[in-house]
């Protein structure tokens, strides 16, 4: 008896994702959201620890509110750059395989380190 393989098992990385031009915006927004939520949690705890005892909650909120969007923006730059390289390589190579993601990570690291 033969079983049908899913799109993921056949090597199609695109299962359930948007087509390439829209994927860049989607990945950029998702990366901003993850960075902002993670940054809020991180800076909330950091602000609470670094504030005087009577002002811990106010200091935590101040720190988280001011720093979380910055971290979200940094994540968005990374996500948008990675996704742009991924879509560009997919267009140039006419393939959607793991090598695009590997090369995109390499190129993104190089661009952001410069």
Image (spheres, rainbow, N blue to C red):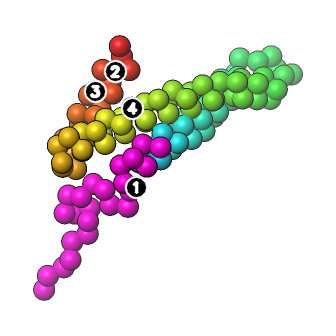
10 Å crowding of disc 2: few (<14), some (14-19), many (20+): few
Residue position for label 4:
81
Q: CA distance from mark 2 to mark 3?
A: 6 Å
Residue at 19% across, 79% down: 3
Crowding at label 3, few (<14), some or many (≥20) Cα neighbours within 10 Å?
some
Whether residue 45 sits left or right of residue 78 in the image: it is: right
Packing grade of label 1 (10 A; few <14, some 14-19, many >=20) is few
Q: Real-space Cα distance between discs 4 and 3?
A: 9 Å
Q: Which element type, helix, strand or loop, lies under badge 3?
A: helix
Q: In what quadrant of the picture does the C terminus appear?
A: top left
Query: Do tag 2 and tag 3 residues touch (Cβ < 8 Å)?
Result: yes
Residue pointed to by mark 2: 111
For the residues labelled 3 and 1, say whether their Cβ atoms are less than 8 Å apart: no
| Residue 113, x across and y down, in percent | 36, 16
**Label 1 element class:** loop
Image coords of residue 2 (percent x, y): 14, 82
Q: Is residue 64 visible?
A: yes
Does label 1 or label 2 sit earlier along the sequence?
1
For mark 3, what is the residue? 107
Give the label on residue 47, or none: none
Give the mark toward the camera: 3 or 1: 1
């Amino acid at each position: 008896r033969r079983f049908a393989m899913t799109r993921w098992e056949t090597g199609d990385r695109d299962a359930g994702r948007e087509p390439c031009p829209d994927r860049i915006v989607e990945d950029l927004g998702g990366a901003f959201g993850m960075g902002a939520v993670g940054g809020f949690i991180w800076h909330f705890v950091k602000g609470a620890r670094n504030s005087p005892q009577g002002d811990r909650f106010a200091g935590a909120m101040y720190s988280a509110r001011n720093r979380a969007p910055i971290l979200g923006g940094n994540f968005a730059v990374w996500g948008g750059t990675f996704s742009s390289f991924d879509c560009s390589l997919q267009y140039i190579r006419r393939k959607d395989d793991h090598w695009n993601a590997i090369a995109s990570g390499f190129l993104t690291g190089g661009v952001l380190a410069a």
